[in-house]
Amino acid sequence: MQSCLRRRPTRRCTILVTVWSCLAVVLFYLRANRNTNHPKMADLSLSANLLNSHFYWPILDVVQRARIYPDGKQFVDMVLKHPIDEVIKDFELRGLSTKSNKEDIAKFVEDNYLPAGSDVKAVVPPDWQPDSINRLAESLAKEPAMANWVQSLHKLWRSLAKEAILSSSSIPHLSSLIMPSGTDSNWFIVPGGRFRELFYWDTYWTMQGLAVSGMHSTMKSILNIMLAFVTQLGYIPNCNRVYCLNRSQPPMLCLMFETYLKATNDMAFLRENYHLLEREYDWWMSERTSTVVIDYKYSYAMNHYGSTESSRPRPESYREDWETASGSGEPEHIYAELAAACESGQDFSSRWMAKPDSLASVETSHIVPVDLNAIMHRNEQLLSEWAGLLGFKAKMHLYADSAEIRINAIRNVLWNNATGCWFDWHLEKQAPVSNRFYASNLVPLFTGSTHSPETTVPQVLDYLDKSGALVYPAGVPFSLSGNQSHQQWDFPNVWPPYQHMLVTGLANTSNKRARQLARRLATGWLRAGLAAWRRDGVMHEKYDCRLADGGAGSGGEYASQIGFGWTNGAVLDLLSKGLLD
């Protein structure tokens, strides 16, 4: 079948490919639907008060539109002082509305809510040891500033570790923070800044750093929380807040497991939880899959982002979403597409917008993303590999077949041979979304999803040379399309996840030119980050590609944050791989 896909199809070959593709789609959906009775979110160990605490929409509408706080997330992360029924009664007695005096609304909030952050407390991870980073620091002895930076990043895990406070005399389950039942783990590593909770895909890069720091128990504790979410929901939410339950994030759970297993070889943990890795994969195949047909001959089940029950503004960005959708005539559609963009982790980017200057044109769920399907391909590879190690021979072949089908889909749908790169696909237009540069287009290098690497990698390198994305001193920007959108996932921002995936992907090839480029890109980004650290004493969520001295990124709904979990992890991992020149 592989040979049929590589040469011009004859009529017989076309029939075979079409039959094979149809069987592939059936295979995907049969497997995806074998666990259809996923527990609903009410099955979480939450009270009704918790589910409703910040979803009494009249209160949310009045408070968020009054601009009590510059950042709407601050309000939905506050903790109720009283049961929700009492708060609603007080709200109604005061007669508050969107026309009320701002000071009166602020007084209502002050009387009924504790500050944001009251539902977590600092905790020192039990496996944090001051000297566990010494080997990496010593390898950088010729660069004392870099070695000191590594020691400082290692110490930051203590300030980013938080323990959930879900029930006490003062906080009787009145927080938007949620923890799944079925696990004793109630502490985790947060990104930092306004992000006081566990975020799904961020944690992959956090775990890269935890592995370098030798914090294997912390890694396992966080994995147990995520696995418990899969047990109860079938998926992992965007973050462990009530308002994020309507969406997930890029499915990095298997890749996190891979990182943990490389550090520990804990095969018993894998055997115990393999079925949950399958279950999350099944959720993505049943809830986030559409069929793509190419030239009326090739049919593939491919993944995209989406959301559920998203007919209203996001609570944490209520005002911004309400303003974006106002006057559109289809606000519910826009709200759903904005939530889908949040599921991608890229909120927001011109990548998801039909018109780069209009966020209201967001169409995330209509796009088949390169990076998501590359990640799914890697998941299939890992599930096959682990099934073999665990003695599940039928599953080993099942996922190996899925991976082969997926890489054919990535090649036939997303690869542009003339340009030498992969591009997102538009489901309705049945064509590439655009030929614009996005760092996400290069993720197949990271996941090992390149067909014929000996010819594909040189083509990608030529594409990169011509793209204009390699000329900046502090790394590769996520896009080159920032002047119109003014979104944070556009130019000039360099985002640690995609910098790490690009550098790692290039370094993992057998191509000398690619490996040299990996070192150059890693060195520029690392030295810019060090310069910012030495000047400001902070780690940024994102950086400005134009600033060799490590300036913070900009744009979007909120100010650039510091902390920062995925940045720290990406830095430690790249340094541990010896990619600094």
Image (cartoon, rainbow, N blue to C red):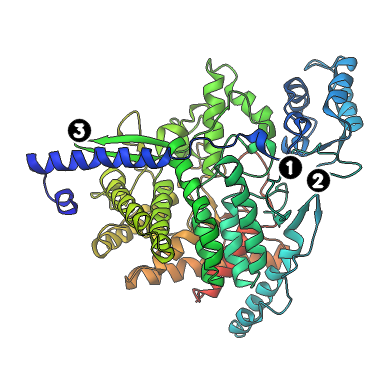
Q: Which residue is mark 3?
A: 296
Residue at figure coordinates x 74%, y 76% from the top left: 130
Residue 41 appears left or right of 438: right
Q: Relative to 36, is 164 above or below?
A: below
Mark 1 or mark 3, which is nearer the start of the sequence? 1
Q: Is residue 100 above or below residue 11?
A: above
Whether 248 is drawn above or below 472: the answer is above
Q: Report if the CB atoms under discs 2 and 1 are less than 8 Å apart.
A: yes
Between the C-alphas of marks 3 and 2, the distance is 54 Å
Task: Report the disc number at residue 119.
Answer: 2
| Place of residue 193 in the rendered image (x, y in percent of width and height, measured from the top left) | 72, 51
Residue 153, given in percent of the width and then of the height, sits at 68, 68
Q: Nearer the viewer, residue 190 or 501?
A: 190
Work out whether residue 281 or residue 377 is closer to the camera in this orientation and state it: 281
Q: Secondary structure at mark 1?
A: loop
Residue at x 66% of width, y 81% of height: 134
Q: Secondary structure at mark 3?
A: loop
| Residue linked to disc 1 | 177
Q: Earlier in the sequence, mark 2 or mark 1?
A: 2
Q: Amino acid at mark 1?
A: Leu
45 vs 106, nearest the viewer: 45
Mark-to-mark CA distance, 2 and 1: 7 Å
Q: Secondary structure at mark 2?
A: loop
Identified by mark 3, the residue type is: Tyr
- Left or right: 353, with 122 as reference point: left
Residue 549 in view:
no
Q: Amino acid at mark 2?
A: Asp
Q: Position of residue 264 (x, y in %)?
A: 56, 71
